[in-house]
């Protein structure tokens, strides 16, 4: 059976954890040799696991939260639909 991208994505976690059976692992590896998209997804998934699993915390720059909320408010106001114009009587 030749795997397509969808099948690789369904098993990417088990592939990383090395819990897929040997035959499926080999098929995934063959697919990854030729598929840049799936290879990028594998690398990204591994990076996310590394970043979220190392226990570090990051402090936001001073004022970041305030600037973020102001920007979100501006964007929400800009995207609100215009109020309906009343029909003249």
Image (tube, rainbow, N blue to C red):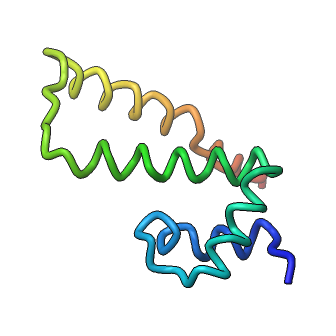
Q: Which of the two residues, 56 or 76, is positioned nearer the viewer here?
A: 56
Is 25 left or right of 56, judged from the image as shown? right
**How many numbered circles does the render carry?**
0
Residue drawn at (35%, 52%), measured in percent from left and top? 49
| Residue 75: percent from left, percent from top | 50, 32
Q: Which of the two residues, 58 or 9, is positioned nearer the viewer here?
A: 9
Q: Is residue 32 above or below residue 56?
A: below
Q: Is residue 51 above or below residue 74?
A: below
| Residue 36: percent from left, percent from top | 76, 44
Question: Most extreme residue toward the top, as rendered?
Answer: 62
Residue drawn at (57%, 43%), measured in percent from left and top? 80
Residue drawn at (67%, 81%), measured in percent from left and top? 23
Residue drawn at (67%, 48%), measured in percent from left and top? 39
Is 53 left or right of 86, judged from the image as shown? left
Q: Is residue 44 above or below residue 30?
A: above
Question: Most extreme residue toward the right, as rendered?
Answer: 2
Q: Which of the two residues, 28 or 5, is positioned nearer the viewer here?
A: 28
Q: Quadrant of residue 11?
A: bottom right
Quarter the C terminus occupies: bottom right
Quarter the N terminus occupies: bottom right
Q: Is residue 43 above or below residue 6?
A: above
Is 4 left or right of 45, judged from the image as shown? right
| Residue 55: percent from left, percent from top | 13, 46
| Residue 63: percent from left, percent from top | 17, 17
């Amino acid at each position: 059976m030749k795997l397509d991208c969808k099948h690789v994505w369904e098993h990417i976690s088990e592939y990383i954890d090395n819990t897929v059976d040997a035959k499926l692992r080999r098929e995934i590896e063959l697919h990854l040799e030729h598929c840049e998209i799936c290879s990028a997804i594998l690398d990204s998934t591994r990076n996310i696991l590394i970043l979220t699993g190392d226990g570090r915390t990051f402090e936001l720059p001073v004022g970041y939260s305030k600037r973020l909320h102001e920007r979100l408010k501006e964007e929400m106001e800009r995207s609100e639909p215009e109020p309906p114009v009343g029909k003249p009587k």
